[in-house]
Structures are given as structure tokens and as C-alpha cells.
Image: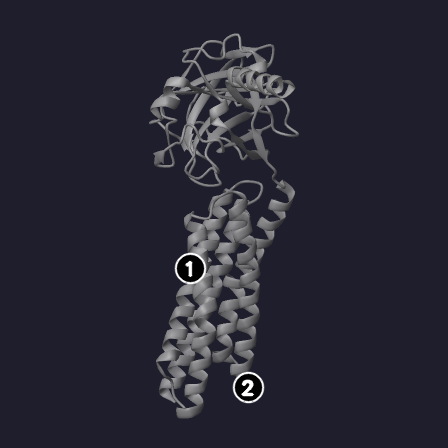
Amino acid sequence: MKMHRLQFLLYWLAQICLVTAQFQGFNPFGNGELTYTIRVPQGTASASMGPVYFQMNSTRSVEWFALGQGAAMHGSNMFVVYTSGDNFTISPRAGTGHYEPLYDKHAQVSLTNGSGVHDGVITVNVRCDSCSFSGGGMVNLTNVFSPWIWAVKYGAPLNTKSVAARIAEHDAFGTFFVNLTKAIGPDSDDPFVNLDKTSITRAFPELFDHEGFDRKRTAHAVLMAVAFVLLFPLSALTLHILPSTQVVRIHAMLQLFTLAVTAAGFGLGVAMAKDVHLLKHHHEIIGMVVVACLVLFQPGMGLLQHRYFQKTGGKGPFAYFHRWLGRIMIILGVVNVGLGFEITGIGSSDVPEGAVIAYGAVAGVIAIVYTVIVMLTGRRATSG
């Protein structure tokens, strides 16, 4: 009898939770002035298409703050809010990578009742009619682990009403996961009016080590830039400028050392890409192709050519494959470092424009020196 009563009680408690849990909300740890709340109307959940509602709230004046639909900036639907006096602007933007998102004129968003700036508190209630699609595909509106991102830039208000205003890089950002089945509620055009806080269940944050990420990003950039701009080209030139009988061994040892540096930088890059869900971005894909070619083919082709030379005293097909594959991969690597700068944001505090200019200048000088030495030594060999 007691067991039946307990089961009866648990059943009704579960029903009460299902009725009251009509929103999913999130407060970023360490950024408690921000609140994001998600609501999916019953009709939208049933049809797997339709409007999605969300509320963005800040109890502190900020330069801008944002909410994004997706696991990372790349491919996400983003919504950036900034103020001008007692007014605010919501700017829907398309996330294209880990740099400034641009205004998306195709986004279908509108404000609902209760939005405004009152006593320094920013409240933005949004109906999004294009949030059924994200990253080029349909969104699962009953996903129990739906990824969303947030970001904030502290400072003086932007004081602009332009939806295409330039924004500076965020001071803090993160990911959280929404159980959309707990955000389902009755159809309403104003779900946030007279919002009952007890109907909000908490979304789950993804723990993110921002300082560790910044350290990995700096180390990755340094290792890859040094490897492709300096070590690979200069190690290749040893065959042209060193008269030693041990030049092949010196060349091989230097290139293997550079390959180890590259592998270390590549490992850091993959770790970062996993952190921000960017493994399918063009920078990461090019990096994987370049490192795979260097690791899988270059040492083997070099060794086969060395053995061929010992037997015949001449160059075989391995020599030309080794030489030109190496040159192509170095060029791709140099370009890909530049793409990495672009992802981080050229002109930001992490990638000052001066650093990018210096990188380009050094790469250009090394390319000229390499080309001149190879051409001169090639002519000497031909004339000799």
C-alpha cells in the first residue's frame, strides 16, 4: 500500500515538473549579470518548424552581448544586442568563424512585448522565425542536448542603431546545452510577459578554460609560423648552401626536428578546434592535409631518393616528388597560418595588424632568398 502511494506521488510530481518546466534558462558562470532564456511553442515542436522565442537580459551596461544557435560561431545563427541611450538594437548575424560575424539580412526576427531598457536593465524578447534552420540544415527542435553559444563585450555602449555596426572581440564567451523538451510550452505570441521564474529549468554549461585556450592558441601560432616560414625553407636550403659531405644527414635531421615542431603545433590546433567545434573549418582541413602529407610522404620519399642516389649516383622520381610536394606544402602552410590569423581576428588584441604585417614581410623575404639561392645553385650545376 505504501509503495502504491509512493508511486502515485512520484507520478504527480513528474507531471507537475512537466507542466511547470516551459523554459530553459542559463546564467554564465562569472557573468551572472547575463541571462538567456529559451522557449519552443508546442506547435513548433509538433511540426518541427515554426517560431522559436528567446529572451536576452543584462542587468549591467555592456558594449554588446550576444546569443548564438549552434555549437560554435561557424555556421551559427547569432543575435547581437547593443544600446544607444534608452534604446537597443538587435542585430541578427551569420557566424562564419572565430571572428566578427556579419549582419544577416535573411534572418527573420521580431521583438515581442516587454522588450526595452529600464533602469539600466536590458531586456530583449525575441521571436525568431528562421531559427528552425541553422548551419544550412534543419534544427532538431526537440533535441535534449541542443548547443547554444553566448558572448559579451564589456565597456561603454556602442551608441548606434545600425544593425551592421562593427563590434570588437568579446571579453568572455562560452557554450551551453538546452534540453528543448523542457523548453516547450503552450503557443503564445508573448511567452515572456509575466514570466514565472519557477517555470524555468537550468540549461547545462560547457566548462571552458579560457586562459588555457589562449595559451594553446599562442603556442600553436608561434610553432606553426616558425616551422613554415623559417625552419622548413631554411632546412631545405642546406642542400644548396652546405658543402659538407654530411649535408644529407644534416638536412634530414633538421627537417625531422621541424616536423616534430609542426606535429606539436598541429596537436595544439586540433585540441583548440575541438574546444570551439571548428574541426570542419577550412583552416583546420588545410592544416590536416598539409601535416598528413608532410608526415606520411616526405620522410619516406627523402629516404627512397637517398638510397636511389647511393645506388645510381643520380636523381630518381622520388627526388622530384619529395622536392615539389615539400614546396607546395610549405606554401600552403604559410598561407594557412594567415588563415589562422583571420579566424582569430586580424586587428584584435590577440592578432595585432603589426604582427600580421611582420609575418608577411618575413615570409616574403624568406621566399625571395629561397628562390634566389635555388636559381643560382641550379645554374651553377647546369653550367658545371
Where is residue 212? Give x, y as percent.
Answer: 64, 46
Label 2, residues with CA under 10 Å away: few <14, some 14-19, many ≥20 = few
Question: Is residue 247 toward the left or the right of residue 126 in the image?
Answer: right
On the image, numbered disc 2 is attached to which residue? 244
Separation of residues labelled 2 and 1 (CA atoms): 34 Å
User: For residue 289, which numbered disc appears in the image?
Assistant: 1
Q: Is residue 306 above or below residue 18?
A: below
Which quarter of the rendered picture does the N terminus lie within? top right
Farthest residue to the top: give it.
194
User: In this view of the protein, which residue sits in the foreground, 267 or 95?
Assistant: 267
Where is residue 260? Give x, y as percent.
Answer: 56, 66
Q: Amino acid at mark 2?
A: Ser
Specify how the rendered protein is coloured: one colour
Label 2 element class: loop
Label 1, residues with CA under 10 Å away: few <14, some 14-19, many ≥20 = few
Q: Residue at x 51, y 44 (%)?
A: 344
User: In this view of the protein, which residue sits in the foreground, 211 or 41?
Assistant: 41
Where is residue 159? Give x, y as percent.
Answer: 51, 20
